[in-house]
Amino acid sequence: QQPVQSPQAVILREGEDAVINCSSSKALYSVHWYRQKHGEAPVFLMILLKGGEQKGHEKISASFNEKKQQSSLYLTASQLSYSGTYFCGTAFQGAQKLVFGQGTRLTINP
Amino acid sequence: DGGITQSPKYLFRKEGQNVTLSCEQNLNHDAMYWYRQDPGQGLRLIYYSQIVNDFQKGDIAEGYSVSREKKESFPLTVTSAQKNPTAFYLCASSIGSPSYEQYFGPGTRLTVT
């Protein structure tokens, strides 16, 4: 039931764009996105809910395709501070817990 | 300031000893969670609690125990039955359902030798 993230790692130059995907084999109720820097706690980025509601930071955008059980996180005009590992967490209808993907490591070079 | 705290940041223990990791929150959140993270891996749920005096096993509960006697506190005990206890442990809290974000503590890095 663990969601699958792709790609596993990506390297960009500052200013380039990236897309990180999160796919589930079951119908989803919500998808969470978090970013974690090495040795630190994950930080909340965005929640996407079934039905189209989104909650999160203004500078982060994401989509949730309910039919495909897939979410994508869009990072545009990347900055050095965007570096870290991005995790999606998924929840099914009626569940009280999240299941996290294995993470996508993003490296931004000057 | 509201937040979630974990202590200590680093913890070293000898094999065969039980050890308790602290997690405290002053966000007035009902739900609390414990995750384990191994190098290069995602977050795996150990235990979670939606309300005081109640908790449920997560995906990897074997060798761990928890209590939820107060809303603010959710300590995790790593017992000697846990075969590979060395890991980074993260505590989180949220308002409740997966409709709301989880707030994470700074983590405790446990090393057992």
Image (cartoon, coloured by chain):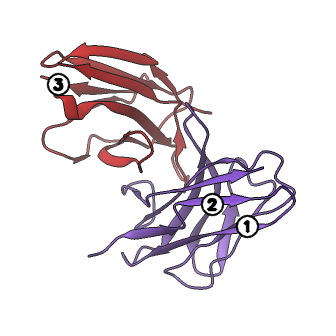
Compare marks 2 and 1 and give the one earlier in the sequence.
Answer: 2
- Rounded to the nearest angstrom, the CA distance separating label 2 from label 1 is 9 Å
Residue occupied by mark 2: B11
Give the residue displayed 42% in from the left and 16% down from the top: A7
**Same chain, labels 3 and 2:** no
Query: Quarter of the image holding residue B16?
Result: bottom right
* Residue hosting label 1: B19
**In the rendering, what colour is chain A?**
red
Dividing the picture into quarters, in which one does residue B96 lie?
Answer: bottom left
- Who's the residue at 24% across and 32% down the image? A82
**Could you say which disc has been placed on residue A37 in the image?**
none
Chain B, colour shown? purple
Q: Residues within 10 Å of mark 3 (few under 14, many from 20)?
A: some
C-alpha span from label 3 to label 2: 36 Å
The amino acid marked with disc number 1 is Val
Closer to the eye: label 2 or 1: 2
Point out residue B85 in the picture as x, y percentages from the top left corner.
Answer: 74, 50
Mark yes or no: residue A40 visible.
Answer: yes
Say if mark 3 contacts mark 2, CB within 8 Å: no
Q: Is residue A62 visible?
A: no
Give how far across and how far down residue B93 sits, in percent. 45, 64
**Subunit of label 3:** A
Between B111 and B3, the residue placed more toward the observer is B111
User: Given contact means CB atoms under 8 Å apart, are the residues at marks 2 and 1 in contact?
Assistant: yes
Q: Residue at x 51, y 34 (%)?
A: A27
Chain of the residue under label 2: B
Instruction: Name the residue beneath numbered marker 3.
Output: A78
Tell me which amino acid carries mark 2: Leu
Q: Residue furthest bottom?
A: B70
Q: Is residue A60 left or right of residue A88?
A: left
Q: Is residue A109 above or below residue A48?
A: above
